[in-house]
Amino acid sequence: MKVVYLWLIRLFSIMNIWRPKNKVVYVMSFDDNVDFIKQLAQRLPHKYVLYVLYKSNTEAAATDLAAFGITTRPFSDGLKFVFEDISVLMSAKLIICDNYYAFLGGLVKLPTTKIVQIWHADGAIKKFGWEDPTTAMRSNSDKHRFQKVYDHFDEYIVGSKAMGQVFVNSYHEKFDKIKLLGYPRSDQYLDPEWQKKARERIFRSAPELRNHRVILYAPTYREHQNFKLPKGLGSALAADPNALVVIKLHPVLRDREVPMRRIGNPKIKFYHELETSDLLAVADTLVTDYSSVAFDFSLLPNAKSMIFFMFDLDNYQKDPGVQDDFLDWLPVEPVYKVEQLKDQISASPVVNFDQFNEHWNTYNDGHATKRVIDRYVKFLESN
């Protein structure tokens, strides 16, 4: 079925190949680049119109963009996408994607159209693409299809050589496709005005967090439903009697909160309605594992300490895998047992993020959005 679907995409691409190239298309499956998209819309040369094709999980962001005057339309794989959205993509001079999109494998790639990946994280602990251990077990046709998608990207926007090398290894691409421009969303973490507003948003909804040490537990998403939080985690996180703990799990995993909720510890809070990015702005300590929030948190002035609680590292190394050299560049040694986590929470050692940021946030200096937009506006104006 996937092969047939991709052939349909190719057929409709050919049928629409002569459309005027007067659009810029942003394909959105993450909702954290809204400010970048708005600024891009404002800077586009007059003959171009911005379209945002969005996945259903980003509907709130799409609504915001539509209110700003940007044309948005939902999409999902299927015949509706083939009949209605391929024509939009084939009218684009520039396509910006925030993720791997299988439909690219069937899209006819014109030499005058540029396809750019602006990944949804500025660093990577876990593996993906060819580096994911499970990829080796896929069929040859699957592998061919994956590489066809990777090869459709002309450029990869990254914030460091380290992240560029991750794409080179994970997508089997050449480093000359890597553009060291910085990750646009990182600008907010270096903006005092955004920091202030983020704190205000949090304290307006959760005033009890003010004037406390805030410990944010934000582990990465697990695809497998057999994932369980280890016994005693709640008590370990709440080891500092003067701190408040905020648990922020992926929506798919929220039922894993039940054991900690049953404890009824008043120092453990659950704020599903609050954005993780805003919570980072009030956290003193971040407890995570393989999540890219580590690369965001390290940019903030309030970041005092970080704990990598990798209790399931042995299993995670098998699927999806972690970067081979991650122990060399983590800002602190990871902990693997609840007792170790408790000790680290109590000790609260201050962490120096300078080397970590030099490695992963090299070009995330608060001006990434401008550099990225300047580059692609210049490309549009030259054609």
Image (cartoon, helix red, strand yellow):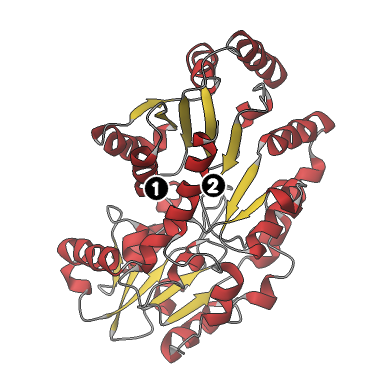
Residue 37 picture quarter: top left
> Can you tell which mark lies on residue 36?
1
Q: Residue at x 61, y 72 (%)?
A: 359
- Given residues 46 and 297, the one toward you in this image is 46
154 over 342 or under it: above or below: above
Q: Position of residue 227 (x, y in %)?
A: 55, 55
In which quadrant will I find the N terminus?
top right
The residue located at (38%, 83%) in the rendering is 239
User: Relative to 101, is 38 on the left or the right?
Assistant: left
- Report helix, strand or loop for mark 1: helix
Q: Nearer the viewer, residue 368 or 80?
A: 368
Q: In this orientation, which residue lies closer to the viewer: 144 or 316?
A: 144
The percent position of residue 118, horizontal first and vertical second, equals 54, 47
Numbered tag placed on residue 118 in the rendering? 2
Tell me which amino acid carries mark 1: Phe
- Residue 248: which numbered mark, if any? none
Query: How many numbered circles does the render carry?
Result: 2
> On the rendered image, what quadrant is the C terminus found in?
top right
Q: What percent of the width, then of the height, locates residue 18?
A: 58, 12
